[in-house]
Amino acid sequence: MRADRLLSILLLLQNRGRLTSRMLAEMLEVSERTIHRDMEALSAAGIPVFAERGSQGGWSLAEGYRTILTGLTTEELQSLLLVRPSSLLSDLGLRNRFEAAFQKLLAASPAKTRGDAESVRRLIHIDGAGWHQSDESFPFLPVVQESVWTSRKLFISYQREEAVVERIVQPFGLVAKRSVWYMVAQVDSDIRTYRISRLLSARMLEETFERPADFDLARYWEQSTEQFKSSLPSYPGRVKLIETSLPRFRQERYAKIVQTQPAAEGWIEATVEFETLESACEIVLGLGSRVEAIEPLELREKVIAEAKAISALYKTE
């Protein structure tokens, strides 16, 4: 609806500052011509929005103008209420602030909306931690966090294989994957990722740094993750498995099904990318009689040898 889009434009300009027509069009998934018409409508409604020309130009609100309208619908507020304080917020010392912010958000909402939204927490619980919690500790997370907040350089030492390495880094941001914390930092002209639990020491320096204006932490992490995945070892193989076991097989972390085709009744053949011979053997053995290794021959022979060893272990006199 146009009213929702106008409100979205107003809040985007208020929260982000100057934005071009192209940027607004991409965010709201409309044409730039539509954005221009919306700006005319906002101006006609008395909203002090104006355009600046030039390469650094764009749409802005008059300095000091703010609206107290949150624009939150019941559904939007409910989606926010599904986010619960986790151990990650506790790691950053933000759990209490999170709760305080939510109380303020609720207090600013209409009674009907507030009642509908609060019911979500009684009916839906989202636990994003997974079954297996990390037992890693992060004693240097607070100093890394402060260095990120204040854009100050950090002197660190960390364990790299058998050696202890020292570096002066410029921390660009923190990333949490499951319950593990990482620091993304620049060293000389390179941007690298450090697992914070492997830091042996961390000391914040007085010297500050300028974070590149075009650096996008989320984009960097996504690209870095893809590069890491592509660098993993690959061990191609082919298996035959009971069709009902296919969903279970797809859940394997170190096996990717590339192609499937029907086999005997109730069975399918699958071309699979494992990581190593050892992990392929473990995965096949884990499914027992529901899967058979076909190729390569060394995988089949290794599975047979392991199966014989298991049988001998449990053989009674």
Image: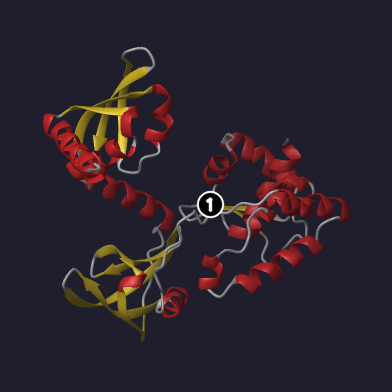
142 sits to left or right of 39: left
The local secondary structure at tag 1 comes to loop
Q: Residue furthest top?
A: 265
Where 13 falls versus 200 (above or below)?
above
For disc 1, the neighbor class at 10 Å (few under 14, some 14 to 19, many from 20) is few
Quadrant location of the N terminus?
Answer: top right
Residue 174 in view: yes
The location of residue 2, given as percent across then percent down, is: 73, 37
103 sits to left or right of 229: right
Q: What colour scheme was applied to this rendering of the protein?
A: secondary structure
The location of residue 209, given as percent across then percent down, is: 36, 76
Kind of residue at disc 1:
Arg
Question: Residue at coordinates 31% horizontally, 14% vertically from top-left?
Answer: 263
Quadrant location of the C terminus?
Answer: top left
In this orientation, which residue lies closer to the viewer: 154 or 273?
A: 273
Question: Residue at coordinates 28% horizontally, 46% vertically from top-left?
Answer: 229
Residue 71 in view: no
Q: Residue furthest bottom?
A: 206
Q: Residue furthest right?
A: 111
84 sits to left or right of 44: left
Where 135 falls versus 24 (above or below)?
below
Question: Residue at coordinates 61% horizontally, 71% vertically from top-left?
Answer: 95
Q: Which residue is label 1 attached to?
A: 53
166 sits to left or right of 288: left
The location of residue 85, given as percent across then percent down, is: 61, 64
In this orientation, which residue lies closer to the viewer: 228 or 309?
A: 309
Total number of numbered discs in the rendering: 1
Q: Residue furthest front?
A: 317
